[in-house]
Image (spheres, rainbow, N blue to C red):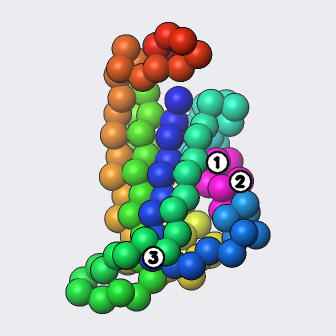
């Protein structure tokens, strides 16, 4: 049920994508205390993006989850920004993250909703 979407202007090699997907999935599951089997992560590289008027490496992340606690968003931001820096070389101050708390009735899975 947690979904993390990563968009970046960085060109990603196949090995980078696999490692990033796995690291992000584990980080989200660990921080939210949810089973990793419910976590979905997507990454889109080489997106046309500018931040602060510059096309230097940047990333925009969206994290949606049912019951996303606001008191965890600061820790999640710290972990995800650090991951963007270590995995993709994107400075933490060039990463935006949008957090969204989803209602279970509006999140479909397995032919139903949560």
Numbered label attached to residue 22: 2
**Which quadrant would residue 57 be assigned to in this image?**
bottom left
Q: Percent x, y for residue 31?
A: 57, 44
How would you classify the magenta stretch by its main secondary structure? helix
Pointer 3 or 1: first along the chain: 3
Query: Under tag 2, what secondary structure?
Result: helix
User: Circle 1: is it few (<14), some (14-19), or many (20+) Cα within 10 Å?
Assistant: many
> Could you tell whether 56 is left or right of 28 in the image?
left
Seen as rendered, the residue at the extreme left is 53
Mark 3 and 2 residues: CB-CB less than 8 Å, in contact?
no
Residue tagged by mark 1?
25
Residue placed most toward the observer, 18 or 24: 18
- Residue at left 34%, top 40%? 100
Of residue 10 and residue 22, the one placed in the foreground of this image is: 10
Work out whether mark 3 precedes mark 2 in sequence or the reverse, and give the earlier one.
Answer: 3
In terms of secondary structure, where does tag 3 sit?
Answer: loop
Provide the residue designation for mark 3: 9
* Image quadrant where residue 72 sits: top left
């Amino acid at each position: 049920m947690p979904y993390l979407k990563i968009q970046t202007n960085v060109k990603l090699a196949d090995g980078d994508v696999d490692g990033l997907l796995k690291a992000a999935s584990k980080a989200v599951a660990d921080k939210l205390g949810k089973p990793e089997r419910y976590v979905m992560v997507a990454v889109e590289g080489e997106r046309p993006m500018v931040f602060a008027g510059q096309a230097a490496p940047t990333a925009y992340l969206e994290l949606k989850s049912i019951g996303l606690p606001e008191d965890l968003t600061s820790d999640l931001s710290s972990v995800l920004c650090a991951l963007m820096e270590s995995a993709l070389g994107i400075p933490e101050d060039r990463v935006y993250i949008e957090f969204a708390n989803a209602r279970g009735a509006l999140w479909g899975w397995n032919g139903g909703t949560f």
